């Protein structure tokens, strides 16, 4: 079967791992899912894990991806990869991935032919590369993503990784169909690690949910992308590498992850205030004092009257009495955060 796939105009820089549409830098899907949905995130990881172990695991996965791409595109079994320098892990160890290639050959269905590797797709402010696109002689198309995670440590284990894949590959399918005009039959996850391997059928998320995720607002900062999506589950910026330090006009230096987190929080609070006002207005217009949905409950309490003490009036009318019952206290100055 011959399939002509319409290519994206986005240019992927493999060394910098960046996506550019003209001069506009786009975000990848991985950091979007980590940030907004908090899937595949290791919140309790130590600095050693983040700066050493995760880069090493990432290089292992990169070597497997490169091995499979070389095999599918050129028929060459490239399984030996040299050690590589890294800014935080110092040196990434050499890799030998012949066992993973063997597992791939066994797992790949005979009816499927590879029609593309590292196929770039994009939508809005996001772009990514699909590991492999398979097609059958009768016209079915499958999108495949390789994973090499240690399932003993991955958040949620195999089910957690499959849920992550469900969102990741659903985004791919959404972008692929709009870019190529072709229908995706199914999503496939292939897990390969140290000679072991499994082939997973991945559930596709509804397009309306995927579009809601891809409509996330994106801001590119000096520390990478910050994501803002009040309708989705979680808002949390994900630093791209190691959080550098931001200096202000004073002598204080503040880590960029703190800057990014506060920025996202202030944006979320601003959006939440607007949405709360809209919800209250809708409830009042419809005479509803309690609203419930699976995510939250909103209640409008009954109005009431209260008695307050007018200290200013007493001070004016009876200054001696006011002075007799007042005292000076020391309070900390207010701390104000304001979006620019």
Image: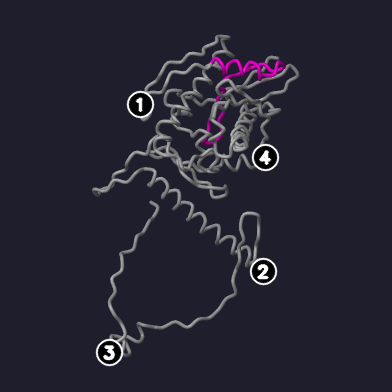
Mark 3 Cα within 10 Å, few/some/many (few <14, many 20+)? few
Q: Residue at x 60, y 15 (%)?
A: 102
**Region rendered in magenta:** 98-127
Q: Vertically, is 8 above or below 261?
A: above
In the rendered image, the quadrant that contains the N terminus is top right
In primary-sequence order, the first of circles 3 and 1 is: 1
Q: CA distance from mark 4 to mark 3?
A: 71 Å
> What residue occupies the far right of the structure in this picture?
138
Q: CA distance from mark 4 to mark 2?
A: 33 Å
Q: Nearer the viewer, mark 1 or mark 4?
A: 1
* In the depicted structure, whether residue 30 falls above or below residue 118: below
Q: Secondary structure at mark 2?
A: loop
Marks 4 and 1: in contact by CB < 8 Å?
no
- In primary-sequence order, the first of circles 3 and 2 is 2
Q: Kindly identify the residue that appears in the image at 44 percent across and 27 percent down.
A: 56
Q: Which residue is mark 4?
A: 206
Q: Is 23 drawn above or below residue 116 in the view shown? A: below
């Amino acid at each position: 079967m011959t399939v002509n796939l319409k290519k994206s105009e986005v240019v992927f820089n493999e060394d910098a791992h960046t996506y550019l549409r003209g001069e506009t830098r786009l975000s990848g899907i991985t950091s979007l899912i980590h940030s907004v949905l908090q899937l595949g995130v290791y919140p309790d990881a130590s600095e050693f894990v983040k700066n050493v172990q995760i880069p090493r695991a990432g290089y292992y996965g990169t070597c497997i991806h490169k091995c499979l791409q070389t095999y599918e595109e050129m028929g060459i079994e490239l399984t030996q990869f040299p050690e590589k320098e890294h800014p935080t892990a110092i040196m990434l160890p050499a890799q030998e991935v012949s066992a993973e290639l063997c597992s791939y050959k066994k797992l790949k269905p005979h009816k499927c032919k590879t029609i593309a590797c590292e196929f770039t797709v994009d939508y809005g402010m996001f772009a990514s590369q699909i590991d492999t696109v398979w097609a059958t002689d009768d016209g079915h198309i499958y999108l495949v993503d390789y994973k090499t995670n240690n399932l003993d440590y991955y958040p949620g284990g195999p089910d957690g990784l499959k849920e992550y894949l469900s969102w990741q590959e659903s985004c791919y399918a959404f972008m692929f169909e709009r870019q190529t005009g072709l229908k995706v039959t199914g999503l496939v996850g292939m897990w390969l690690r140290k000679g072991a391997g499994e082939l997973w059928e991945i559930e596709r998320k509804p397009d309306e949910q995927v579009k809601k995720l891809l409509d996330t607002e994106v801001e590119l900062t000096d520390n990478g992308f910050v994501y803002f999506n009040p309708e989705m589950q979680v808002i949390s910026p994900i630093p791209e590498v190691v959080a550098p330090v931001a200096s202000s006009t004073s002598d204080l230096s503040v880590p960029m992850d703190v800057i990014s987190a506060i920025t996202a929080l202030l944006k979320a609070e601003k959006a939440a205030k607007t949405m709360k006002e809209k919800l209250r207005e809708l409830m009042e217009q419809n005479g509803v004092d309690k609203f419930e949905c699976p995510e939250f409950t909103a209640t409008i309490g009954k109005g009431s009257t209260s008695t307050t003490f007018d200290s200013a009036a007493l001070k004016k009318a009876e200054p001696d009495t006011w002075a007799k019952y007042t005292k000076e206290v020391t309070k900390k100055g207010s701390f104000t955060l304001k979006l620019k």
